[in-house]
Amino acid sequence: MTPPPGSLLAAEDLHKTYGPTKALDGAEFSIHPGEVVAVMGPSGSGKSTLLHCLAGIVVPDSGSITYDGRELATMSDAQRSALRRSEFGFVFQFGQLVPELTCVENVALPLRLNGTSRKEAERAALTWLERLEVDDLAKKRPGEVSGGQGQRVAVARALVTRPRVLFADEPTGALDSLNGERVMELLTDAARSTNAAVVLVTHEARVAAYSDREIVVRDGRSRDMERIV
Amino acid sequence: MSARRWAGDLGLGVKFGFTGGREGWGRLLLTAVGVGLGVALLLLTTAIPTALTVRHQREAARLDYTYSKPPAKSDATLVIADLDTTYRDKEVRGRLVEPEGPKAPLAPGLRSYPAPGEMVVSPALKRLLDSRDGALLRARLPYRVVGTIGESGLVGSQELAYYAGARDLAQHINGWQVARISAFGPPADQPEDKMDPVLILLVLVVFVVLLMPVAVFIAAAVRFGGERRDRRLAALRLVGSDSRMTRRIAAGEALAGSLLGLAFGTVFFLIGRQAAGGVEVMGISVFPDYLDPSPALALLVAVAVPAAAVLATLLARRGGGIEPPGVVRTARPARRRLWWRLLLPVAGLALLVPMIGQGRSHGNFNEYLVIGGVLLLLVGVTALLPWVVEAVVARLGRGAVSWQLAVRRLQLSSGTAARMVNGIAVAVAGAIALQMLFTGVEGDYSKETGVDLNRAQMQVRLSRGVSLDEAAGKFADVRGVRKVVAMGEASVGDTSWRSADGPRLSSQVTVGSCAALREVAKLPGCRDGDVFAVTGLGWDTDTPPLAEPGRRLHLDTSQGLDLSREVTWTVPHGLKRARAADAPNGLERGGFLLTPGAVPAQAAGAIVGQVYLSVDESVPEVHDLVRNTATDVDRFADVMVWTATQQSRQYASIRTGLLVGSVCVLVLIGASLLVSQLEQLRERRRLLSSLVAFGTRRRTLGLSVLWQTALPIALGLLLATAVGLTLGTVLLKMTDTPVGVDWPSVLTMTGIGAGIVIAVTLLSLPPLVRLMRPDGLRTE
């Protein structure tokens, strides 16, 4: 399959095995700027592995991933790290906030890693905390805030560098439905306002409803639901 | 709270400890191995008194000298000659034996005496002689090996010893090297060997200093994987266990680790005990069965270790309870209080202060106060360090991302960081104090030998009657010998040495060529046949009245080959005067100096030869080549390699003990540090992976880990130096020794501590890189 024209990130025929387990077995994917794509599927279907491959965290055994016309497989680890620092953002289900840093320092961290000064980074971080309605938590540590609040801080951190692609792996997996929905609203609104593409891994239809398009992964193979329809 | 409830909760914890699945078992094994290493070291320590006693008993059982009048020859006597030698810096205990009848006493470890020309050897000596390494020594021991010495005749498994059969030994009996004995064992009139109180103090402090870090290590080991265990126990709160109950269950889990650790420790100890038979550390070896822990102390270890595990866990949990997951958020930790932490070192000082100024003469240091005082001071380090780390990191400013990550981590959990370096800090504090004490009292236990190492580096003392010229020629031919100065020594008196009271006036006689005599005095001019009287020595008051030309003097022939003859010498009319000068051995020789032509022929048997050798130390095995030649010249020759200073044997043994112990403790602490470092990293695996996921450079994370270790270590070493210097000062004041800081030792100790940390950090880098892989993000 050829990636649709104008796609920002596209993958073809991805294969990845962990020991005897086939995590990806010919998976395909594409996303346009500003688009929100939900990757759905049951536990163990390979959706997180697909996200890790698309983000350049994991290198697939075979297949091709192109980002903005560049082939990820030919990039070095340092180049892929730099890409993740500057162009991608991440929200995970667990463990993404550094427990020792305050919320504002957590959000400022990606900017600081890119060389922005502390003051400037924290000023930008505060703006994003305001947008995510958690600016009152700026000086608190992750251990002192609720799960939903922490997840909003994580979304702020993911968006602070104004990434072109936001990867969200079960971002509401640890939240109740009310909190989950609020986080999703804020995440998609903020992403759309910056024209960021969002790759949203979830197994909840309620969360997938925030997307423009859904891809289902099963046994390491992907299916574009829009095309099937 | 009923004991049954306690036991029930502890039992439940023990059960959890053993049924935690693969991860639980991993944690349990980690704790057990850590505790096991500590227990093995403790058991080894409890075995040391027994080992020393057995060594002492065996040494005493084979003593072969007497202070009283030697027994008359009979069929129950043995003539024995001490031929101890050195081979490549290792001592070889050698004896020539000649039983004078069938009832002659048998040396411990022997079934019978070897015949002349044969020898029985220790197993280690046999191995050495059979190997290529023993070639030079084989040349020195020209006897056929006919058996081995049994364990009861040896003080260590690696001891080099032999008994060789000989004949005609009796004529060499001189009371110090060759003796006639009727029994082995300590002489009845042997003076009691009381240990110097300062040395006892040193031993006590060495034990406390070495064992404290082991205790700290065990306390740390029972908390390996504590954070993970806490999370698991938090789930118990959900099903209704209260916080005290949960604490007891946590203590039960630690108890499981410590009980398994006791078993591991026993196995490690037994393996180590067996292995100890095959090694020698700084000249000391033991037989495995020497290392039997005294039952009372072993029981103490068996009870104290599990009890300490339970107490350490309960105390560690006293501040923060384990709460159900998600119910209570992690608050900022409460600030540590200083007052009770200061109480410990202050109490330690209070115990030691009353003993200040007692010194050596009144030095009956109360051992309980010493142990208690040192213990409290060192425990004070472990109590103060978390406060110091917390207080300092709270004030640290912002910096690069790696620095910020490290500082914030330390601000949030300074206790974990302090716990990691406690062992090192205690070891360094104790070592600094001991080094100060050792350096301070070193002067009392080592003395300058006074020898002039520029003129000679070896001395060979020959028996009476051995031809000096011949000996000098042979030594001159040895590879590596640069210069040979040979001279004879004897004594003369105004009357016979055989009279009841001996001579009233006596003087030294030195025999040598003009060149040799110039080594001991300034001569006005010299030819063969000249005789000089040495003047200008204040202590030599007997020589002037004896140095009257024509006066007949009696040579001392009371010991030696030809004991029956009285040998006299008349002071010649051509007697010259010479001025005293330092001999190569640093001593001044007075009396008469005789060139060979002036020595009466019958005096040869009364003269003891001394050969001073200047050798090229760069020639391989030059000392052993000289020793071999000395044996060839005279089997009773006594060879000495000169050193600038000489140390008391007991003092040197304690210092050696400290070194051996320090090495064991530091290896143990290094291992513990590495384990807890890896544990910390494993705990943060997911976080590390997610940081890498959004592009954090590995270098940044690596540096952050380094800062996290380096900061507490730097603070720990600073505190250790302060406490060490305080303790060292108090100990020096106790022994009434001027207080001085041996800065090179302090820097060495802190350097070793820092080196361990660097090594541990480097060793933990590869696992860190592995943990930073994206696999950590996988949840399925």
Image (spheres, coloured by chain):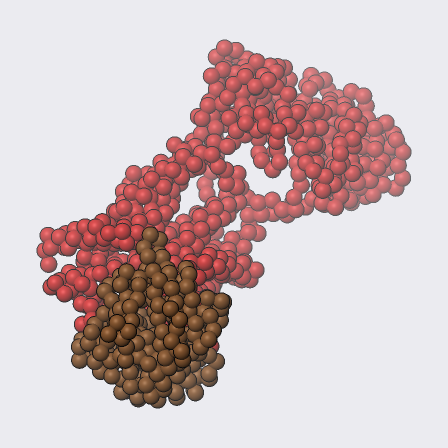
Chain colours: A brown, B red
Q: Give the x, y percent position of residue B477.
A: 78, 30
Question: Residue shown at 44%/77% (left/top)?
Answer: A68
| Residue B407 position by quadrant | bottom left
Along the line of sight, which residue is nearer the eye, B723 or B76? B723
Along the line of sight, which residue is nearer the eye, B580 or B334? B334
Question: Residue shown at 68%/26% (left/top)?
Answer: B631
Horizontal side, residue B84 vs residue B373: left or right: right
Along the line of sight, which residue is nearer the eye, B387 or B699? B699
Horizontal side, residue B336 vs residue B450: left or right: left
- If the image is split into quadrants, where does the C terminus of chain A sit? bottom left
Q: Give the x, y percent position of residue B306.
A: 25, 50
Question: Residue shown at 61%/47% (left/top)?
Answer: B447
Residue A169 lies, with reference to residue A118, above or below; the image says above
| Residue B684 position by quadrant | bottom left
Q: Give the x, y percent position of residue B120.
A: 54, 20
Residue B90 lies, with reference to residue A63, above or below; the image says above
Q: Give the x, y percent position of residue B555.
A: 73, 26
Residue A85 lies, with reference to residue B313, above or below; the image says below
Q: Is residue A6 visible?
A: yes
Question: Residue shown at 29%/45% (left/top)?
Answer: B262
